[in-house]
Image (spheres, coloured by chain):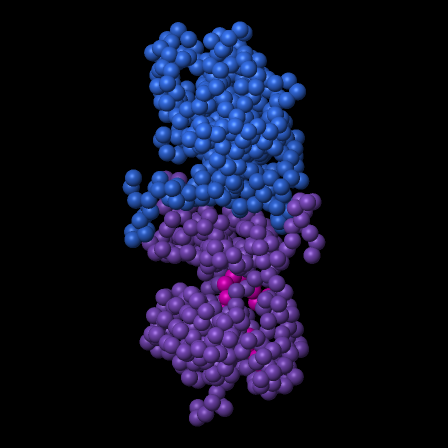
Chain colours: A blue, B purple
Amino acid sequence: MSSSETKPNVIVIGAGGVGVIAALSLFYCNKSEVSLVVRSDYDHVTNEGYKILSCDYGEYENWKPHHLYKDVHHAIEEDPNRFYEYVIVTTKNIPDGPVGSRVPTIIKPIMENQLVQHPDKKTNILLIQNGIEIESDVLATFDKSKYNYNMLSGIQIIGSTKIGIGIINQQGHEHLSVGSFNASDIDAIKAAEKFVGLYLNEGLNSIEFDERVRYSRWKKLLYNAAINTTTALVGLDVPRTLEFAKNKKSTEMEIYKPAMQEIVNIAAAEGIILDEQFIEFFTNITRNIMFKPSMCVDVQKHQLMELEVILGNPIKLAEKYNVETPILKMLYNLLILVQCKLKEEKGLIKFDETTARLADS
Amino acid sequence: MSSSETKPNVIVIGAGGVGVIAALSLFYCNKSEVSLVVRSDYDHVTNEGYKILSCDYGEYENWKPHHLYKDVHHAIEEDPNRFYEYVIVTTKNIPDGPVGSRVPTIIKPIMENQLVQHPDKKTNILLIQNGIEIESDVLATFDKSKYNYNMLSGIQIIGSTKIGIGIINQQGHEHLSVGSFNASDIDAIKAAEKFVGLYLNEGLNSIEFDERVRYSRWKKLLYNAAINTTTALVGLDVPRTLEFAKNKKSTEMEIYKPAMQEIVNIAAAEGIILDEQFIEFFTNITRNIMFKPSMCVDVQKHQLMELEVILGNPIKLAEKYNVETPILKMLYNLLILVQCKLKEEKGLIKFDETTARLADS
């Protein structure tokens, strides 16, 4: 490609540990023009750029992608005619959070603008997020008979964290799987394959086209539904949850493994066969590293957890298929209370102590 | 009784909200000579006495019982020949805590001294504590063929808290049930009945002889095993746990009530029939008052919880009788991790982050 005019535009929405490294990978590859939506750190990053410590890319000072925006409205305002071929969402997925932070709400202005400005072009929506059934909200909001888009799904394995304002620390090698949510949608498959070319920096990061991305989501869910959730409830890193157990066994034998077996059973009802050896694999994957999963970090930072996409949605499917999930349900019923505690702290719900009742919103 | 010489001696070990009011009730009744073992506040209370705000007895400044001691050794040293007819333990019962804080360890010096000094007199050990099977530890430690004692058991319903150094706030009317642990032990029954006479202040406090004190313990356990435990895990008062639930129902229907049903089932296997209407009763008893149960307060104060006597012991019995307890076990397996977190904070256990393993003690 000869000039930036001919490069496709990509917009990454969400500038945490996942989003900034995604923007960096695209930028480094130099086959697309990269816009990044940075909410809270916008002023700082506009002035000084990012400081990035990356195990894949080395150290950066003052790094910026091609464009920085406060929000999607800002992006549209600045260049209403620009067509984003890929709209990548890397925010936390919290459907029970504030309306403005839900995925369909976030991308709606871009979808509307592209519908008006570029009715013949097909937008590729790519969610690089945790959980199950996260694509359904988008598909339900944007009717395919009106909006012209492909639904792509991405699973990123990376140990990357925003550790300060404009500072990203990536400690784990990036591995991104990208595929079409609908495994038989030829157009979406092509778009996912094209994306791999825009993203891959050989010898540095890893990205692969994933022909069964729903399977990969369920596989990653094994860890998140069982282990991420438990650490959030008890406020401990993974090795401590294993070692502090009764006879050093109860967490593994009575929580993690049966919870993962329940996920295997729900997935099976969905037609997705997860090899049961993954239960052993995920039980051990963080046994020896001092790792605190995301939901545990969220609680400690007083941030909402991705509870609904990690536990709520699989449990809804289990109920639909009459799959028994006693362990997952108990974790869910307890974590709902913790999530509401966080919501109350944030003023999202109100509890009236004089009546001992939740105040109607 | 004409002089204090003829009054029986009573020693109350443990000067929290429960112990200080017990000492006050005995002192007020004026039929016994009351010694109180005050661990942490000893210096302050020796100098200034207690400040007590009591809904039963009114306000006190500078209140002291007849004798104050730092620990039981101190009591024995000061008057080795004094015979304590009643040895009342009101500490928290934490068998997995430091050895020195376990009930048999605490009372052993008195039991040994009374065996030597008063071999013909019978000591009445009275545990006013939470939980199930707490008497077994005492019975196992002090062989009845050697030590001369009755095993009494007490259940106190009271909203009393130590809110500062030497300051007790009693907000709920005291109701104490006292009986013989062995319901057919005539001697112990008589001792319990006598104790009622030493303790009752008519029109002020309530105390009753309880002919089935083990039943009363199991009954109180319904609340503690289901509700106290859950609040400790999620860090919320009871009304919030009910209101924050999915559809305002999941906590009640999927945690509290099934957990209490499991206690009903274990008790039944022990031959103790709890009316199932208590499940509804205890679910509602603190629905409308902003109450945080003891284990929840313990976690927030970074103190060990009475986890083993409230959940560990009933679950052991359930295993013995093959009673299914999925909800209680899940609460227990999660709370074990929280208890170990508290133990690590207190230096009772050590975790080696370089090996990601619990260090051997």
Work out whether A225 lies above or below B3. Answer: above
Task: Please say whether residue B125 is one of the residues in the magenta stretch.
Answer: yes
Work out whether A308 lies above or below B118. Answer: above
Horizontally, residue B9 falls left or right of residue B63, namely: right
- Measured from the top left, where is residue B67 in percent x and y? 50, 82
Please report the bounds of the magenta region as a residue range: B122-136
- Measured from the top left, where is residue A62 in percent x and y? 52, 28
On the rendered image, what quadrant is the N terminus of chain A found in? top right
Work out whether A57 lies above or below B221. Answer: above
Q: Quadrant of residue B314?
A: bottom right
Q: Quadrant of residue B69?
A: bottom right
- Measured from the top left, where is residue A143 in percent x and y? 37, 16
Residue situated in front as seen by the camera: B42 or A161: A161
Q: Residue at x 61, y 46 (%)?
A: A240
Work out whether A26 lies above or below B328. Answer: above
Q: How many marks?
A: 0
On the rendered image, what quadrant is the C terminus of chain A found in? top left
Q: Residue at x 49, y 39 (%)?
A: A298
- Measured from the top left, where is residue B48 in percent x and y? 44, 78
Q: Is residue A324 visible?
A: no
Q: Is residue B243 visible?
A: yes
Task: Please say whether residue B260 is one of the residues in the magenta stretch.
Answer: no
Q: Residue at x 55, y 76 (%)?
A: B70
Residue situated in front as seen by the camera: A19 or A59: A59
Residue situated in front as seen by the camera: A157 or A3: A3
